[in-house]
Image (spheres, rainbow, N blue to C red):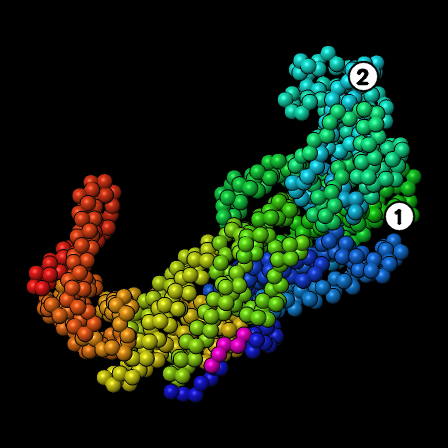
């Protein structure tokens, strides 16, 4: 045994240090743009430069890194482009919060100096993110890194905006939008989070002009009543038909408003009478377009009431609500107030309740763009979603897409390339370059929604140029797979698809792999407010990046959420420690190297019957690789993880390494046969490291470097050879050993107690005496008395059916006669049940007509074995 070259205990802190730096120095992550190789490309979903990466980023990154490393080891020319998102609202909010701590507002600084402060933030946090990517071991090509607010991306953004404007896909108009009163900016529909919230339904009296009678109108938002322009009833509602065309008094401001009819109002909903406030409700706004109604905005941009609210000017909208209710109660204009639970929209970024209001904004027209996405998904060239149900989710959203509000009242972001004539503000100039007589124009101060620039990410990262095809585009576009969460399918995935189709005439990616959210151990969504978040960097410090990655990947099923589990993390670390210890054993027992021809030279050409265990592990290796290859392109990582785990833990460590120990100390084997086993040990270990590398890059690199012939495991390529040897003898041995172990456990027989046993043959399948050594080694202190003879039953032995044999174990030292008889009767009864079950199946015409010939033959074989075993047991019982 040679000197130990690996530490006795796996230390993730030592193993994971300095390796990432070396990988970068060796340029292992850079795209080679090798035209002779198949291509595989990924672009990272760009994290926001607002803080640290969370566990969801680690999960997303680990999945992508597994794919890119697997494809690289499979002989692909790979590229994984990193980048970050400027995250307009979120980043500006963070910087403003930092400034407020020093009693500074962005208005104190002015736009340019404030933007400088945001750039300082960006540089600080982008460096943090890169350090976290390094900790996770992500194989990113940093030479291609992009930022959504770089000059390069700005040119693309301006070009696309102008093109879409010229093609009438972008327009400026006055429409109802979601307004964030805290951030003072418009939001798109999908930036609004709806939560079930306790509220109240208020019922008010709207008196007719003569003040003799009134109609009851319900609302949850009384403060908007100052913007009421009419009441609406259904024309078929017999209760109110006679009132159409009449006027009522608005209780909030005493103004007369008309009663109109529209089928939009549901007869059996509420009181059947609806107030119409077009400037503060999306549905009411649509009615205003249909009926040419006035638009009365009653609020300022900060959520306070404007001059239309008369006595309530300057009050916060919710404060005005309470005062208005009290005043109307005093006037006896409140019919009743009910407590309710209702869905209320909140700003995703600031957390405040949004205010629908009419505003002049820039919009993307969605009807044509939605159609091209829907047409793509109905074609043979559709994008494949994993799982497929999310393709339907995309289609449903596209069928119901609203025009997209893309202007934001922020300073941080791509400023809209539009200018307004100083003398006629309705005259708009849109262009990549400013108007020539710039002194007569004022640029639009708004910026574009972050998702607008993110929508170009797949081709913008490929150095897209509208006038020519870049080398990156030619080689790697469309990208192979987009890995992302189901929560941003419409935010991002849909927009990438229609912008890719529109500007590259190609779908942006071939596959979309959807994963869920990471939840805590109780199934709750992780959030700051609940205090249940987990910092991936802290997990890496405690358990290592490899253990975290292995846990995240092997618990990942397409489309499903993942529960964080400390126990599973520990199990992942223990598994890596098992591989570490297995590697130590191999290195201490083999002088061979991981060279390309070492295995062929020492093993394949010199097989002997004494190397049956080596053939067996090669068979298992081939089956493992087959399952991995079958599931990798379906992104069934949990299945792959289970297959690899079982092969390494059970087949290689629990069986093969133990068998190899016996092989290496067997004096009856030649030096060549022992060398064959050493070569197999090292060869299979290398294949294990290659299989595990995409999951656990640091540890596998460390072990590989001890015996590798190249500078990194990433310079290797998977060995695609398939082995299919006849190893029935070994399978029989395993069954015998397992049965003896189970027998010892069931009878509470200590390993120190020696047992006598024999092996009686049901069929003529003899086991060579050279394999008895394995049985003795594994089964602990068994007398070496295998009998390769026909039935030789004796009442002093307990009989255990094992495949084609009966294992006969002498029982006089540990069991009494009554127990023997009971055991035999129990075995007989169990065999009777199995025989009955087989007879029922073989007499079932439905089974015989539908089952394959192989299945029927297998069942008949089982029946014959059960019958033979049954006859033997009956004979033994009678002998007793």
Residue at image x 72%, y 50%?
349
Residue at image x 71%, y 58%?
50
Q: Secondary structure at mark 2?
A: loop
Percent x, y of residue 870: 14, 57
Q: Is residue 579 left or right of residue 403?
A: left
Percent x, y of residue 120: 78, 64
Residue 447 marker: none
Reply above or below: 745 against 857: below
Examine the image and state in which quarter residue 18 appears. bottom right
Residue 438 marker: 1
**Main SS of residues in magenta:** loop
Residue at image x 75%, y 51%?
89
Q: Secondary structure at mark 1?
A: helix
Q: Residues within 10 Å of mark 1 (few under 14, many from 20)?
A: few
Percent x, y of residue 20: 59, 73
**Residue 290 seen in the figure:** no
Percent x, y of residue 629: 42, 60
Nearer-the-camera pick, 331 or 523: 331
Q: Residues within 10 Å of mark 2 (few under 14, many from 20)?
A: some
Give the residue at mark 2.
208
Residue at image x 20%, y 55%?
830
Tell me the distance, in whole angstroms, between the alpha carbons under discs 1 and 2.
Answer: 56 Å
Highlighted magenta segment, given as a residue range = 8-12
Task: State the quadrant of the N terminus.
Answer: bottom left
**Residue 776 seen in the figure:** yes
């Amino acid at each position: 045994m040679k000197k130990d070259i690996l530490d006795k205990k796996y230390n993730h802190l030592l193993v994971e240090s300095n390796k990432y730096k070396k990988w970068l120095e060796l340029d292992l992550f850079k795209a080679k743009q090798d035209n002779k190789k198949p291509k595989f490309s990924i672009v990272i979903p760009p994290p926001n430069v607002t803080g640290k990466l969370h566990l969801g980023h680690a999960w997303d990154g680990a999945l992508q890194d597994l794919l890119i490393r697997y494809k690289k080891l499979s002989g692909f020319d790979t590229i994984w482009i990193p980048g970050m998102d400027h995250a307009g609202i979120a980043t500006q909010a963070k910087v403003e919060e930092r400034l407020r701590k020093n009693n500074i507002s962005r208005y104190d600084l002015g736009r340019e100096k404030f933007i400088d402060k945001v750039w300082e933030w960006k540089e600080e946090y982008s460096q943090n993110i890169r350090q976290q990517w390094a900790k996770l071991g992500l194989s990113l090509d940093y030479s291609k890194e992009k930022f959504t607010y770089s000059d390069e991306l700005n040119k693309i953004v301006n070009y696309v905006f102008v093109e879409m404007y010229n093609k009438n896909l972008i327009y400026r108009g006055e429409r109802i939008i979601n307004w964030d009163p805290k951030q003072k900016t418009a939001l798109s529909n999908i930036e609004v989070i709806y939560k079930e919230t306790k509220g109240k339904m208020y019922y008010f009296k709207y008196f007719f002009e003569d003040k003799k009678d009134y109609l009851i109108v319900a609302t949850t938002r009384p403060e908007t009543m100052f913007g009421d322009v009419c009441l609406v009833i259904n024309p078929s509602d017999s209760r109110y038909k006679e009132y159409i065309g009449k006027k009522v008094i608005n209780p909030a401001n005493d103004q007369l408003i008309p009663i109109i009819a529209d089928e939009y109002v549901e007869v059996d909903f509420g009181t059947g009478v609806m107030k119409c406030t077009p400037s503060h409700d999306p549905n009411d706004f649509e009615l205003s377009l249909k009926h040419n109604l006035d638009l009365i905005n009653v609020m300022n941009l900060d959520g306070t009431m404007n001059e239309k609210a008369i006595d309530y000017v300057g009050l916060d909208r919710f404060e005005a609500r309470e005062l208005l209710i009290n005043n109307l109660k005093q006037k006896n204009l409140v019919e009743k107030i009910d407590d309710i639970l209702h869905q209320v929209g909140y700003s995703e970024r600031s957390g405040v309740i949004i205010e629908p209001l009419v505003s002049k904004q820039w919009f993307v027209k969605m009807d044509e763009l939605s159609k091209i996405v829907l047409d793509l998904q109905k074609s043979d060239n559709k994008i494949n979603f994993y799982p497929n149900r999310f393709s339907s989710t995309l289609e449903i959203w596209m069928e119901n897409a609203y025009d997209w509000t893309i202007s934001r009242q922020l300073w941080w972001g791509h400023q809209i390339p539009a200018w307004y004539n100083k003398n006629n503000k309705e005259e708009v100039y849109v262009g990549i370059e400013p108007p020539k007589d710039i002194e007569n124009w004022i640029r639009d101060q708004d910026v574009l929604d972050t998702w607008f620039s993110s929508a170009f990410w797949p081709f913008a990262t490929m150095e897209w140029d509208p006038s020519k095809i870049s080398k990156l585009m030619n080689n790697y576009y469309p990208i192979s797979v987009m890995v992302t969460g189901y929560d941003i399918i419409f935010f991002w995935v849909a927009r990438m698809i229609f912008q890719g189709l529109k500007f590259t005439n190609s779908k942006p990616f071939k596959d979309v792999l959807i994963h869920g959210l990471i939840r805590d151990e109780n199934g709750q969504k992780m959030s700051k407010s609940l205090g249940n978040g987990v910092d991936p960097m802290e997990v890496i410090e405690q358990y290592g990046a490899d253990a975290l990655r292995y846990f995240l990947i092997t618990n990942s099923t397409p489309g499903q959420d993942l529960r964080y589990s400390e126990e599973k993390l520990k199990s992942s670390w223990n598994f890596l420690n098992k591989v570490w210890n297995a590697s130590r054993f191999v290195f201490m027992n083999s002088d061979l190297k991981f060279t390309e021809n070492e295995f062929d030279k020492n093993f394949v050409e010199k097989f002997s019957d004494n190397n049956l265990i080596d053939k067996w592990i090669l068979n298992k290796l081939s089956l493992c690789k087959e399952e991995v290859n079958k599931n990798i392109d379906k992104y069934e990582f949990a299945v792959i993880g289970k297959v690899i785990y079982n092969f390494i833990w059970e087949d290689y460590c629990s069986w093969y390494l133990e068998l190899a120990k016996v092989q290496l100390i067997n004096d009856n084997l030649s030096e060549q046969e022992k060398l064959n086993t050493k070569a197999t040990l090292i060869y299979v270990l290398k294949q294990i490291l290659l299989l595990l590398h995409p999951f656990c890059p640091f540890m596998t690199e460390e072990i590989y470097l001890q015996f590798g012939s190249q500078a990194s495991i990433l310079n290797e390529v998977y060995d695609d050879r398939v082995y299919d040897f006849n190893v029935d003898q070994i399978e029989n041995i395993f069954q015998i050993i397992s049965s003896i172990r189970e027998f010892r456990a069931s009878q509470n027989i200590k390993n120190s107690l020696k047992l006598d046993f024999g092996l009686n043959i049901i069929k003529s399948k003899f086991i060579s005496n050279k394999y008895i050594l394995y049985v003795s080694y594994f089964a602990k202190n068994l007398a070496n008395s295998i009998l390769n003879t026909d039935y030789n039953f004796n009442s002093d032995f307990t009989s255990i059916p094992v495949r084609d044999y009966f294992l006969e174990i002498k029982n006089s030292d540990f069991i009494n006669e009554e127990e023997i008889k009971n055991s035999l009767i129990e075995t007989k009864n169990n065999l009777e049940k199995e025989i009955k079950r087989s007879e029922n199946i073989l007499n079932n015409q439905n089974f015989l007509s539908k089952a394959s010939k192989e299945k029927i033959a297998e069942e008949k074989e089982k029946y014959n074995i059960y019958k033979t075993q049954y006859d033997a047991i009956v004979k033994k019982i009678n002998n007793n």
